[in-house]
Amino acid sequence: MHNLDIVIMAAGKGTRMKSALPKVLHTLAGRPLLGHVLAAASALQPRSVVAITGHGATEVEAATQAMVGAGAAFALKFARQEPQLGTGHAVQQAVPLLPDEGTTLILNGDVPLIGSATLQAVLDACAGAQPVLLTVEFADPTGYGRIVRNAAGDAVLAIVEHKDATPAQRSIRECYSGIMAVPTAMLKRWLGQLTNTNSQGEYYLTDVVQHAVADGVQVLAYKITDTVQVDGVNSPVQLAALERAYQLRHAHALMEQGVRLADPARLDVRGELLCAQDVAIDVSCIFEGQVSLGQGVRIGANCVIANARIDAGAVIHPFTHIDGERLGVQVGPGALVGPFARLRPGAQLGEGVHIGNFVEVKNATLAKGAKANHLAYLGDATVGERVNYGAGSITANYDGANKHRTVIEADVHVGSNSVLVAPVTIGAGATVGAGSVVAKDVPPGKLAVARARQVNMGNWQRPEKKLL
């Protein structure tokens, strides 16, 4: 809809969050609440999005601009609500930024799981001609504005806020979600007629309904049964509950694609997780950023994986931490990683590579069949095929000012507890004796031993403990 403008209310303080962080910037599934709403809004292809800010306005506006980015297909605008005198007063601040021609869709920045398909259905019902409210029926409607319909039940006569409702009206379970689509010219007219003659002394956005009815304009309601879509966040308890609801839905969607989850209640996806056929994920795993799992990949319990591509047949053993950040991490087909391994940005493991317990790899490439099975560090390194990298060995890649690269060519054997001082090259087929500190290149096929000669001392006695 090229004539669609979206208003997102994001001015509230969120007192019950008990946090210095503005409420809409608290995260759900790794993304700010407002970020979820912006994503749903963007999917509707609006011509503009107006964010109404108030508490923490500078911080919220900066975060919103960062989330939208420079290449957005819509115009991003801001309106300040200071002081905050109610929802109607909030939308009044956006009026100068809204063209008369078109439709305005009003959303809330603390209702993160609203679906773009639901919003599109509301817009379709509106059709640029009449107001449409998104409503939902709650088992316990306490705190929500009640929908009062006409006798035929096909139109809305009013929205009555909970605090202003009569006992009979409070028995109504159909409630206003806080989302509405209204032809903009009508909305502007009705906003100008709002008063604050109510128990809160505020300007209610919901009062536009009574003005529409007074003008003889029919108000429709698009009713859904999925309450999670319209659940707002007002406290850490509500945020945690919505997080679990989101994660469980995501888990079920993955299982419907064929992913085997040991326990769908113990999965956290805080970004995008793409899974090929026959992927198996054990309990208490966290996926962040962009993660891709190839066919038959197995992820052990308690792994944290961010910004990584793991190819077919690879196994990530329990308690492994993979974080590619901006450079990414790639794990090749059939590779074995962990347990208790750490792959950092720029780690690239080839086919069949083994990275064992307490091994850290950073900005290093390991070719097919290379192995580092125990207690080792490979940083800023190029490792050839079939290299065996011994336990306790490290690449000393930092000289206190600059990073340097270590090259270990194919079929090299590095003995345990060795230090390779970069920049250095270990030639193909060479061997480094255990305990060596290698600071010079080793020619192909040669044995390098760089350690003090062993001396066995005679006539020596171990000290005895003194008794006090």
Image (cartoon, rainbow, N blue to C red):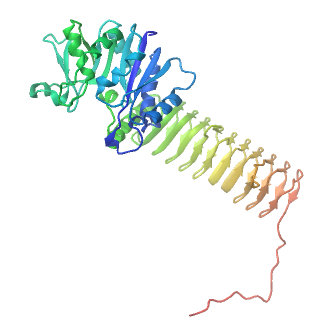
Q: Against 405, is 222 above or below?
A: above
Residue 225 seen by the camera: no
Q: Residue 448, located in which quarter of the rendered image? A: bottom right
Q: Quadrant of the N terminus?
A: top left
Q: Position of residue 157 (x, y in %)?
A: 18, 14
Q: Residue 255, located in which quarter of the rendered image? A: top left
Q: Position of residue 35 (x, y in %)?
A: 45, 30
Q: Position of residue 59 (x, y in %)?
A: 47, 36
Residue at 40 percent across and 16 percent down: it is 96
Q: Against 35, is 263 above or below?
A: below
Residue 17 seen by the camera: yes
Q: Position of residue 429 (x, y in %)?
A: 84, 50
Q: Quadrant of the C terminus?
A: bottom right
Residue reaching furthest front?
Answer: 83
Q: Residue 213, located in which quarter of the rendered image? A: top left
Residue at 22 percent across and 13 percent down: it is 211
Which residue is more in the foreground, 196 or 115? 196
